[in-house]
Amino acid sequence: NLYAFFIGKIYPIKQTGYYTQAQRQNDTIKFTFLSIFNSVSYNLFAQTQRDVVQQKELFGKIMQKANLLTIPLFIVLAIMCPSLFGLLLGEKWLPAVPYFQLLCMSQLFSISDLLCYNLLNARGHTRLTLHVESLKKTAMLLSLLLLPIGIHYTLWAYIGICWICTLAWLVLVHKEIGLGTKLIWKNFVPAIAVGSIAGCVIWNIDLIIPQMSSGWMATKIIVGFTLYVLLIVRTYPRLFQELKTVFSALKDE
């Protein structure tokens, strides 16, 4: 809530309300996935902390599945959020759309950050993770210097901070368990490709069908999410079944 607090101090309440609404919707999606993968990943990493090879393999599998679910979703949501906001919240909230889109871009790799954080904590590097998080918060404070120029500038800076932190997490994990460039490529590129293809298709639908009637907005949302699921299934046919198996096993424990 750091940004919302200072935005409220500088900008009119109406502008603050648009940002707060965008942040609320983004947080709902982000924390849903974070809460799911947080407990799952930490338990598994803690169980395998004595076997680096097994932990490395496990980390790669979880990250691949998590990225394939979340990265395309955030891209799809960023592209079709005008229809989502118009249909679910009403046209009065459309000025919040640009903020939501930037927040989605900042959270593209949030699940990867969480997995790296949990892996390092499971291996006993709590002080290291605290330092990284402290540096991130410090950078966020510095990005507030851009707030008087415009909220967008601060959010663009926030995107840069989040992405740089993701790179830092990956470097630290690589040093700890030898992650490797090939594994990172395998975990990120297919997810970004799926999101980009789905996003381009939805973007073109918006250009062809720009109407904001409820029927058209609902159609675009259905098409967007259907395409998202189909592309994931095409890229990784066993993804949903494997996730179901993992969650069922943990639930039984």
Image: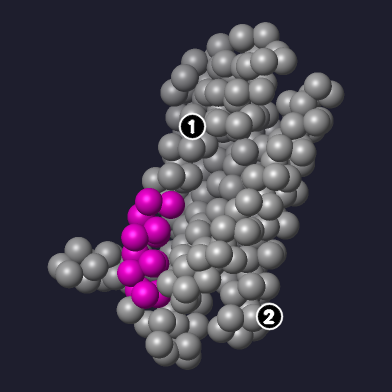
**CA distance for labels 1 and 2:** 34 Å
Helix, strand, or loop for circle 2?
helix
Query: Which residue occupies the extreme left position in the image?
Result: 252
**Residue 82 percent across, percent down from the top left:** 59, 28
Question: Quick check: 54 left or right of 244?
Answer: right
| Image quadrant where residue 208 sits | top right
Whether 32 is drawn above or below 153: the answer is: below
**Residue 8 percent across, percent down from the top left:** 63, 16
Amino acid, disc 1: Gln
Magenta stretch, main secondary structure, is helix
Question: Does residue 194 belong to the magenta stretch?
Answer: no
Whether 54 is drawn above or below 89: the answer is: below
Range drawn in magenta? 34-46
What residue sits 51% from the left and 65% below the top?
A: 126
Residue under numbered circle 1: 25
What residue sits 70% from the left and 13% below the top?
A: 11
Amino acid, disc 2: Thr
What residue sits 48% from the left and 37% below the top?
A: 27
Callout 1: 10 Å neighbours few (<14), some, many (20+)?
A: some
Quadrant in which the C terminus appears: bottom left
What residue sits 60% from the left and 53% below the top?
A: 133
Question: Quick check: 68 left or right of 175?
Answer: left
Question: Does residue 36 belong to the magenta stretch?
Answer: yes
Q: Is residue 211 visible?
A: no
**Residue 232 percent across, percent down from the top left:** 48, 62
**How is the model colour-coded?**
one colour
